[in-house]
Image (cartoon, rainbow, N blue to C red):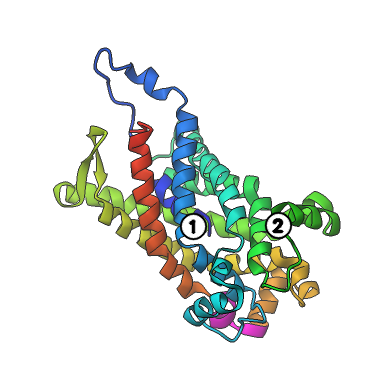
Amino acid sequence: MAAAAAAALAAAEPPPAMPQAAGAGGPAARRDFYWLRSFLAGGIAGCCAKTTVAPLDRVKVLLQAHNHHYRHLGVFSTLRAVPKKEGYLGLYKGNGAMMIRIFPYGAIQFMAFEQYKTLITTKLGVSGHVHRLMAGSMAGMTAVICTYPLDMVRVRLAFQVKGEHTYTGIIHAFKTIYAKEGGFLGFYRGLMPTILGMAPYAGVSFFTFGTLKSVGLSYAPTLLGRPSSDNPNVLVLKTHINLLCGGVAGAIAQTISYPFDVTRRRMQLGTVLPEFEKCLTMRETMKYVYGHHGIRKGLYRGLSLNYIRCVPSQAVAFTTYELMKQFFHLN
């Protein structure tokens, strides 16, 4: 899912404002345009991460929905086949729509996470890992709902094969879906499995990453942690430890929620697939995929690819986000 990098990044709770020396501008100066700086930091990190793994994302969409050109191939053979059939740029088909989506997605998720976390702590009195799990799930679902039409268009573009284009670009895809698939509601096909998948995905991601981080910094702060370069009073995980914790959290969360991701993709593709009329609802889609392809080759088809994308995606996301946090003085 698009939340893989953002969920793990957001799980690393931003440090509280530290006292500033006289003349340094003070905490108020640091909070100036904080939402905009957070927006840019999360957006840039997300775009870099998603561009890095864009070829794997394209292959995942092709495999999940059993595109007839590649349905007989595996992950690596599809990665080799796409450039031969569509050129190397074919591996990045649909990435433009993803870049447009990832900026608002990251901004909404980060800001919603902080708001939900504060609300849950102050109103419900829940703290610790549980409030992080709840806030993360709610923030992830909020971001998904707000940016879902862009994800729909991105998947439609990624599923197209050279020579068989239904859509000429992002704007044309928006116009076509709106005109032929029920107006505005047409952009929200597959939203229910997305929401149901996002709750455990984001929740488990936040819980696992937060637990690993807190345990690591509590029991081995010198070995696993280091002072933040722009705020020495804040202890953060070393980059390679961050990568490891994020990868583990993402892998566990993806395994739990993956069948919902497959269902969402098929529902998003809608009339593009020949079995469209058999996959109108979430239940029908899951039943069809399980009945015709089983668990390993159906509900979990392409999961190995998600594991493969996890490491480079997390590496780029964490590295870029840490640099952006320092550049925009978010610590």
Q: Amino acid at mark 2?
A: Gly
Give the overall secondary structure of the magenta segment: helix
For the point 45% across and 52% down, the residue is 48
- Mark 1 crowd level (few <14, some 14–19, many ≥20, 10 Å Cα): some
- Quadrant in the rendering for residue 22: top left
For the point 30% across and 60% down, the residue is 244
Q: Inspect the magenta stretch and tell me whether residue 151 lies in it.
A: no
- Res. 97 mark: none
Task: From the top left corner, tell me how far across and down residue 331 is, in percent.
Answer: 33, 33
Report the residue marked by disc 1: 51
Task: From the top left corner, tell me how far across and down residue 84 is, in percent.
Answer: 56, 79
| Magenta residue span | 292-301
Circle 1 — which element?
helix
Of mark 1 and mark 2, the one earlier in the sequence is: 1
Please say if 120 is above or below 279.
Answer: above
Q: Is residue 259 visible in this depiction of the protein?
A: no
- Quadrant in the rendering for residue 266: bottom right
Report the residue marked by disc 2: 169
Q: Amino acid at mark 1?
A: Thr
For the point 65% across and 69% down, the residue is 159
Circle 2 — which element?
loop
Give the spatial CA distance, label 1 vs label 2. 18 Å
Task: From the top left corner, tell me how far across and down residue 188 is, in percent.
Answer: 72, 54
Seen from the viewer's position, the closer of residues 191 and 312 is 312
